[in-house]
Amino acid sequence: MPSFDIVSRVDIAEVDNAIAGIGREIATRFDFKGSKCTIERKEGELQLVADDDLKLKQMHELLKVHLTRRKVESGALDFKPPEKASGNTMRQTILLRQGVDAILGKQLVRELKDSKLKVQVSLQGSEVRVTGKKRDDLQAAIGLVRGLKIEQPLQYVNFRE
């Protein structure tokens, strides 16, 4: 039976390349001269350190621009509230959303079952498997999921006949 998986993955190598580009731009830009602004990645999260709110907002813009150039969607970023750090600086943690969590998975299952499409939907860890008898049903399911207002980027992989 034809099937496909709905997943949410972020290419970590592209994120690292974008971070390197941001580091170079911070080092060369005049408005960042003499500042303590840094960005680094640890596991599935990014750490931003900036002198003040204005620099933090500028770093957010740099992050979005560089990630977009690298074809990483900014919807995969989960911004935590900024906090005060030592030396009058601001620190912010940004989580990289990987995988379809249980809440989003249940929402996708509910929407696909309510649509009356002839497909079976199942949660498999951090993926959602959609199976149907016809390829057209699966393509209609992909169209339905794309039409939903979900900010987390989703990919459709393992399309099998």
Image (cartoon, helix red, strand yellow):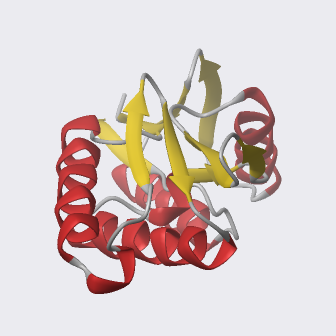
Residue at image position (65%, 68%) is 52
* Residue 126, x across and y down, in percent: 56, 23
Decide which of 96, 130 is in the foreground and name it.
Answer: 96
Q: Quadrant of residue 55?
A: bottom right
Near-viewer residue (54 or 116): 54
Looking at the image, residue 91 sits to the left or right of residue 5; the answer is right
In the rendered image, the quadrant that contains the N terminus is: top left
Counting from the top left corner in percent of width and height, residue 43 is at 43, 22
Along the horizontal axis of the image, is 53 left or right of 99?
A: right
Would residue 91 appear left or right of 16 to someone viewing this image? right
Identify the residue at the far bottom of this view.
Answer: 30
Q: Position of residue 136 (x, y in %)?
A: 40, 59
Residue closest to the eye, 155 or 116: 155
**152 vs 58, nearest the viewer:** 58
Residue 137 makes an appearance in the image: yes
Looking at the image, which residue is at 32% across and 63% down?
Answer: 67
Q: Is residue 67 above or below residue 39?
A: below
Residue at 49% over, 56% down: 153
